Image: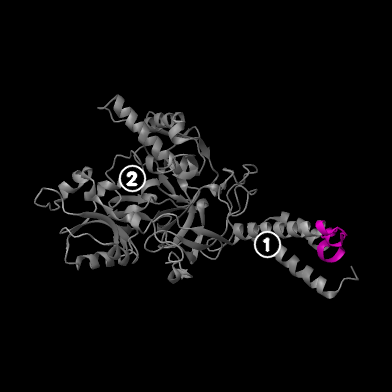
Amino acid sequence: MKQQPLKQWIKFSIAAIICLLFMIWIGSLWILLLLPFIFDIYITKLIQWTWWKTSKNNSVRRVMEWVDAIIFALVAVYIINLFFFQNYQIPTSSLEKTLLVGDFLFVSKVAYGPRLPNTPIAFPLVQNTLPMLNCKSYLETPEWGYHRLNGFGHIKHKDIVVFNFPAGDTIALKKQNPDYYTSCYNDGYSFLRSQEPNIQPTIDQCYRYGREIVRENVQEYGPILYRPVDRRENYVKRCVGLPGDTLQIIKNQVYIDKKPLYDELGVQYNYMVQTNGSPITSDIFNSLNVSKDDRQLLTQDPGNDFILSPMGFQRDATGHFLPVYDVPLTRDAVAKLKKLPFVTSIKVEPDWMGGDVFPLGFGKKWTRSNFGPIWIPKKGATIAINTSNLPIYRRIIEAYENNKLSVENGVIYINNKPTSTYTFKMDYYWMMGDNRDNSADSRYWGFVPEDHIVGQPLFVWLSLDKDKSFPGNIRLNRFFRSATN
């Protein structure tokens, strides 16, 4: 040890300090077990960590240099990806026009504090499935409980947040959209109504029969898989509701505790646009930033007449509807279209086209644009629980907070004890996409638990337009654009 130069002691001191700080941050004394190894690497050198460098065999040296570099890179990437930063690609249009399909995001995990992994043994940079091999990228054991480290801040209203899909704990491998629970409910409801058209089935009946239908129909749905929290698919949405908020949506306006939460500039809704017969060209759609997938000409299909007739759209001399497009538009895009001389009518897409919303089978006439009021659970808060509001909070009690729940003769039992109150163990959030009418969000699958929060996207580091070919598909104007608003 005395023979080691000063620089080795300095290197050891820096490495030891980093190790101690990491131990304090994580809060685990097990990290101290690394100190003897760090001491040996820099000072005692009892273990020949780089034995191959003195090998007389050139092939051994070359192979081991590659092995050493690969192992170091994998470990470094795993630690960075786990505790600090993660890459995320926008796969759908749910946040347009704020974030676009093809944007690659740099996501900070320290913004809200990184989670310790539920499944610590996993292949880095892969969420749940190894490419080509089509097998799990992680080991199910050991599986750790939820623990979040300190971060730089907390989620605020209007933050864009990356999180694990709450309804992704159970998936039908061949049919993941809609999610497993929605498929079970819909299939169960359809089956029961086909048997007894005059009887309204209960929520429990729909799920019970639906699960059997989904699990037996392997050809359509495939195998049913379970995924731990950190291995569920990543979603990115905007947080519009915080723990303890009472949220309501009235004619697309979000209210928090009865006060309006006004939309960001990029928020858009679906509109039906009719022209006098002239088509809306690709150049016009491009100027409005409407992608090819979102340009739907309803009048191409006569089967859409049942949508158009009640809305009073104009017909030509032959009785056919003049062109009607169903497209998502921002407020600025609507204003631009109104100025075009051949555009005769712009109407909001009918609310019923949004389908059933959370919680399924609730009985209230909530829709995607007229929803609530609904209270968002806060850690430590206690509420009265009854059969009227149980559908809203049942999944929290059973799935997210791991309680046994049953209802017998109108009495709610939690962990085999009758109860009329419930105290929440975690904070919950309400997430919505900026592309409001084309977003599968909390209006459809409910609350996002705090243990599902991944991080906050900081900026776009790459953006590729799927509607164009290389090199025209590279959106240079989006490089390093902020993703926090």
Which of 384 and 372 lies nearest the eye of the viewer?
A: 372
Q: Decide which of tag 2 and tag 1 comes sooner along the chain.
A: 1
Which element carries disc 1, helix, strand or loop?
helix
Q: Is residue 163 magenta?
A: no
Q: Which mark is residue 357?
A: 2
Question: Is residue 418 at all visible to an observer of this figure?
Answer: no
Residue 444 in percent (x, y) is at 37, 47
Give SS at disc 2: loop
As displayed, is residue 157 above or below residue 182? Answer: below
Tell me residue 337's x, y (percent): 23, 65
Q: x%, y% of residue 238?
A: 41, 59
Residue 239 visible (yes or no) = yes
Camera-side residue: 233 or 207? Answer: 233
Q: Which residue is mark 1?
A: 22
How many labels, in total? 2
Q: Which residues are magenta?
A: 40-59
Q: What scheme was used to colour the molecule?
A: one colour
Task: Name the amino acid type tagged 1.
Answer: Phe
Crowd rating for badge 2 (residues with CA inside 10 Å; few <14, some 14–19, many 20+): many
Residue furthest out toward the left: 317
Furthest toward the right, the residue is 3
User: Type of residue at label 2?
Assistant: Val
320 versus 346 height, above or below? above
Q: Nearer the viewer, residue 362 or 266?
A: 266
Q: Quadrant of residue 245?
A: bottom left
Residue shown at 30%/24% (left/top)?
195
Q: Is residue 280 left or right of residue 405?
A: left
